[in-house]
Amino acid sequence: MPVLFRDGVAPFAEVVNKVEFIPLETDSVHILGENPELWVEDSCFIVSDWQNASIFRYSLQGKFLNTIGRKGNGPDEFSGIDGWSYEDGLLTVFSYPDKVLNFSLSGELLSRRKISNLGMSSYMVGKDVLTYMGYGTGLNYRAALLDSSSLKKKLIEDTKNNNVFNFTPLSPVITKSKDVFILDPFNPVVYKYDAEELSPYILFDLGRFEVKERYYSFKNPMEAAEYLFSRDYAYINRYAEGSDVKFVEYILTQDGEGKPYHGLYYKGEWRWFSLGGFYDSIGRAFRTISCDDVLYFLVAPECLREIPEELSGTIVNKTCLGGLSDDNNYVVMKVFIK
């Protein structure tokens, strides 16, 4: 049954039990750029800075530990980060068009190889690579499974071979929280990966904001873009889930302006919220959910000046925010649900 998207509001603070902040250590070298990604491991935080092609490791108390890999064009460097994954002590970085680098958590390069047919975003699943090509590539599929050398299996087949522009959302298309998911941005479906298959997992009913079928009929990417941008539409930007909690972010564009709306699945029902100010900023800062249903956000320090009163009372360690300035690094915000 489709989940009905609501562009209304609901109080976010009413589901919050407590909030804990962990400032990431600040120095002149390891300041994160816009829209960094966060992975929570048992012993550390791994933060990737897609803007500056950097990956840093921090302790769970926010202390900087080490850099993993470096930006560059050398054989042991990545020119950009087009996906990364971590499993069993091995951190894999993908750099388009064909570079795959494996590192230890301490930053040591363990191996490197080349795999052809990498898409715009990739992720290790066992010994294979799950990769997302997207729209408008001229291929008859939008995602694929690659083995050590080449294409192994086509996933999300695209029989129309759409010549529309290849849209890249603000966050990675392939994500992992409890499981591995693919977000196919203009498609209101979250896909779940399992046993070499991508299966529709959640269908969101976007109503009048759904991208219309006509969009896919254009043969010229510019005409398709002009058609889309002249209308109200929504696209999925982020999804994660724990044991009993799910979180989705949609960017709803009206009159050319995008605004985030967030859905939180809690106690058997979906609640939608978009309240402006601090709530919008932490919505965009959402990164993942742990298996025990703790929500993790990466919040820019300047946003912390706007914490509303109803949420402020749930913070268990306010004193750690006292010395922060706008020049500080990001702050990890842990939200414990009631």
Image (tube, helix red, strand yellow):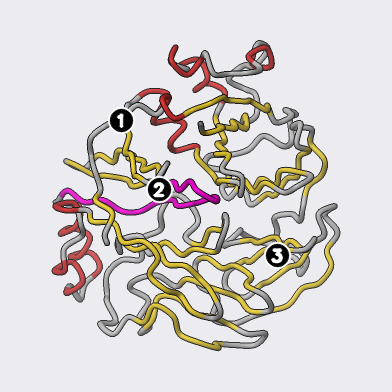
Tell me how many marks there are.
3
Residue 167: image quadrant is bottom left
Q: Position of residue 70 (x, y in %)?
A: 74, 54
Badge nearest the viewer, 3 or 1: 1
- Judging by the rendered image, the residue that carries numbered circle 2 is 248
* Amino acid type, mark 3: Thr
* First reached walking from the N terminus: tag 3 or tag 2: 3
130 within the magenta span: no
| Image marks 3 and 2: residues in contact by CB distance under 8 Å | no
55, 315: nearer the viewer: 315
Q: Position of residue 216 (x, y in %)?
A: 21, 71
The numbered disc on residue 10 is 1
Q: How far apart are the alpha carbons under marks 1 and 2?
A: 15 Å
Relative to residue 83, is residue 250 depicted above or below?
above
Q: Is residue 324 left or right of residue 59?
A: left
Residue at 63% over, 38% down: 32
Residue at 54% over, 64% down: 180
The numbered disc on residue 92 is 3
Provide the secondary structure element on which disc 3 rests.
strand
Provide the secondary structure element on which disc 1 rests.
loop
* First reached walking from the N terminus: tag 3 or tag 1: 1
Crowd class of label 1 (few under 14; some 14 to 19; many from 20; radius 10 Å): few
Residue 75: image quadrant is bottom right
Magenta stretch bounds = 232-247
210, 79: nearer the viewer: 210
237 within the magenta span: yes
Provide the secondary structure element on which disc 2 rests.
strand
* Amino acid type, mark 1: Ala
Crowd class of label 3 (few under 14; some 14 to 19; many from 20; radius 10 Å): many
